[in-house]
Amino acid sequence: MEIGQNAVVAFRYRLLDDQGQQLEASAEETTVYLHGAGGMLPGLEKALQGKAAGDQVTVTLKPHEAYGAKHPDSVQRIPLKHLRGKKRPRPGDVVAVNGEHGPRQVTIVKVGKFMVEVDTNHPLAGMVLTFAVDIVDVRAATTEELAHGHAHGPGGHHH
């Protein structure tokens, strides 16, 4: 089966920056998503369209195809107590904060006694990224997955 609208896709990946340095890798666990449901980076989803299990795809995405441009005005001061986790953060750490729409990743810019400055841009915003993808499995989505708008099962969303 080829990857197309409403296919559930399982893949492993390596993520590299524009210097070829590895930023992330999925190791043995697969990433699973419902193709066409908006749960995947647009540029990556476009590159996977029409591929099949066993295919290997390498695609380089510009910021607008991945996590967007980096906005310099996205630094905010927040109370230290709003950070999730027990240890004291350091500049450069990526941490979760409790926002009005749930947890969100931010990057620590500066740490004070009671306040921290955080950059609310996605940690990979503004970067040219290369994904090296091994497609493990492609199958038709179930009726339930289509109704919920995401993949279920191993590596996907569980209820």
Image (spheres, rainbow, N blue to C red):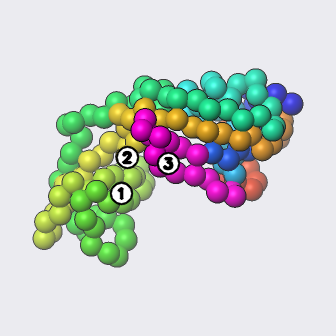
Q: CA distance from mark 2 to mark 1?
A: 7 Å
At x 37%, y 46%, the residue is 123
Which of pointers 1 and 3 lies earlier in the amino acid sequence?
3
Label 3 secondary element: strand
At x 68%, y 29%, the residue is 48
- Above or below, comparing residue 4 to residue 119 in the picture: above
Foreground residue among 22 and 106: 22
Seen as rendered, the residue at the extreme left is 113
Residue 73, quarter of the rendered image: top left
Residue topped by disc 3: 22
Span highlighted in magenta in the image? 14-29
Residue 58 position, x and y percent, is 62, 32
- Above or below, comparing residue 79 to residue 151 in the picture: below
Foreground residue among 43 and 20: 20
Count all numbered tags in the image, as a single digit.
3
Assess whether mark 1 and mark 2 are in contact (beta carbons under 8 angstroms): yes
Residue topped by disc 2: 123
Label 2 secondary element: loop
- For the question of whether residue 22 can be seen, the reply is yes
Residue topped by disc 1: 94
Foreground residue among 105 and 132: 132
